[in-house]
């Protein structure tokens, strides 16, 4: 899970606060002494878990009530089980990389859970936003401006942030590498296709695309066109689907493309998150 700190001359934005397993506020304050505004790319707990450490929290208007609501029973436990499976898989993966593949660099290392963190005690804590965002809003940090793009699909409140002057797009959970989650109860494939088409139409304004999940966190703008085409083909029924499971071990169907895949609901129905 990747969070991003964007600093201007007057203030800074922290895009997403992670799961809340470590103190991301002290990390952010080590990086900047400017006043901090947390911006959530959407309400899901893996992007908002550290919100409780901050005073100023912004989210798209459609996410305000969702952010305040209690997470479903068992969600925290199931995600901590996934985290443990991931950590267990890391050892052999890293060992094989060291000998054969050499893809991993210092930016791409899985770190252990923080000292003293008890996964069994982990809970998802609802928080209250202090500012509601709309499509077209501009966050002026002083010498750096972030444009808010409402990009529903993964969830109704998803946003991306675009620093147009510097060609930087922060994709939230709308643009991703690895599996893109469109299998959730609050996902909407048609809206996802529209949102990715809109982002693809902006690709001449973009130099680098940053994403929130997995290790390929920095991407070429060509990913925007590839994702838009992938969703278009998926909606048209023009893709092969294979069986897979999501991070909660819930059965899904997966459409695979060159640089990402898309999870959609299978016969078991939509997944919860
Ligand atoms: Zn999400």
Image: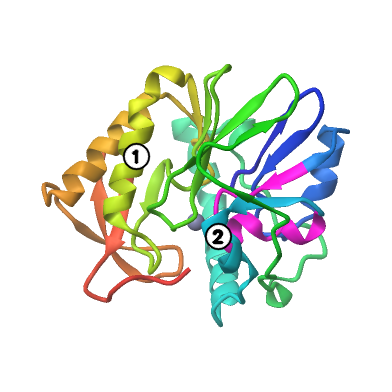
Q: Nearer the viewer, residue 6 or 271?
A: 6
Q: Residue 196 carries which label?
A: 1
The residue depicted at 70 percent of the width and 70 percent of the height is 125
Q: In which quarter of the image is residue 196?
A: top left
Q: Position of residue 243 (x, y in %)?
A: 24, 62
Q: In this view, does 126 lie to the left or right of 73?
A: right
Give the residue number, with chain letter if any, for mark 2: 63
Q: Is residue 236 above or below residue 6?
A: below
Protein image colouring:
rainbow
Q: Does the magenta stretch include residue 186?
A: no
Q: Nearer the viewer, mark 1 or mark 2?
A: 2
Q: In this view, does 123 lie above or below 50?
A: below
Residue 88: in sight, yes or no? no
Residue numbers of the magenta segment: 37-54
The residue depicted at 64 percent of the width and 26 percent of the height is 145
Q: Nearer the viewer, residue 187 or 218?
A: 187
Report how far apart the C-alphas of labels 1 and 2 lie in the structure.
Answer: 19 Å
Judge: label 2 CB < 8 Å from ligand 1: no
Residue with the most extreme bottom position: 73
Q: In this view, does 213 lie to the left or right of 8?
A: left
Residue 93: in sight, yes or no? yes
The residue depicted at 43 percent of the width and 45 percent of the height is 151
Judge: label 1 CB < 8 Å from ligand 1: no
Instruction: Name the secondary structure under disc 1.
Output: helix
Q: Which of marks 1 and 2 is nearer the N terminus?
A: 2
Q: Residue 67 carries which label?
A: none
Q: Position of residue 161 (x, y in %)?
A: 55, 36
Q: Where is residue 224 in the image (x, y as percent from the top left)?
A: 36, 31
Q: Quadrant of residue 144?
A: top right
Instruction: Name the secondary structure under disc 2.
Output: helix
Q: Is residue 44 magenta?
A: yes
Badge 2: residue crowd in 10 Å (few <14, some 14–19, many ≥20): many
């Amino acid at each position: 899970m990747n969070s991003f700190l964007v600093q201007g001359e007057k203030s800074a934005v922290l895009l997403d606060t992670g799961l809340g397993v470590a103190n991301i506020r002290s990390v952010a304050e080590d990086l900047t002494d400017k006043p901090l505004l947390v911006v959530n790319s959407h309400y899901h707990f893996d992007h908002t878990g550290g919100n409780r450490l901050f005073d100023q929290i912004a989210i798209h208007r459609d996410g305000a009530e969702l952010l305040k609501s209690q997470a479903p029973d068992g969600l925290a436990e199931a995600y901590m089980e996934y985290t443990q499976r991931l950590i267990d898989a890391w050892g052999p993966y890293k060992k094989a990389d060291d000998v054969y593949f050499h893809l991993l660099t210092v930016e791409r290392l899985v770190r252990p859970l923080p000292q003293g963190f008890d996964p069994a005690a982990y809970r998802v804590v609802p928080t209250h936003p202090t500012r509601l965002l709309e499509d077209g809003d501009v966050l002026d940090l002083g010498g750096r401006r972030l444009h808010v793009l409402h990009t529903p699909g993964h969830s109704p409140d998803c946003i991306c942030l675009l620093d147009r002057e510097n060609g930087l797009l922060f994709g939230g959970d709308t643009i991703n590498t690895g599996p893109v989650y469109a299998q959730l109860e609050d996902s909407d494939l048609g809206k996802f296709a529209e949102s990715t088409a809109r982002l693809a139409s902006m690709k001449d304004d973009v130099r680098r695309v940053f994403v929130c999940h997995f290790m390929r966190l920095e991407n070429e703008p060509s990913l925007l066109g590839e994702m838009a085409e992938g969703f278009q083909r998926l909606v048209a029924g023009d893709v092969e689907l294979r069986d897979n499971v999501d991070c909660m071990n819930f059965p899904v169907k997966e459409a695979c493309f060159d640089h990402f895949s898309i999870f959609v609901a299978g016969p078991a129905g939509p997944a919860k998150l």
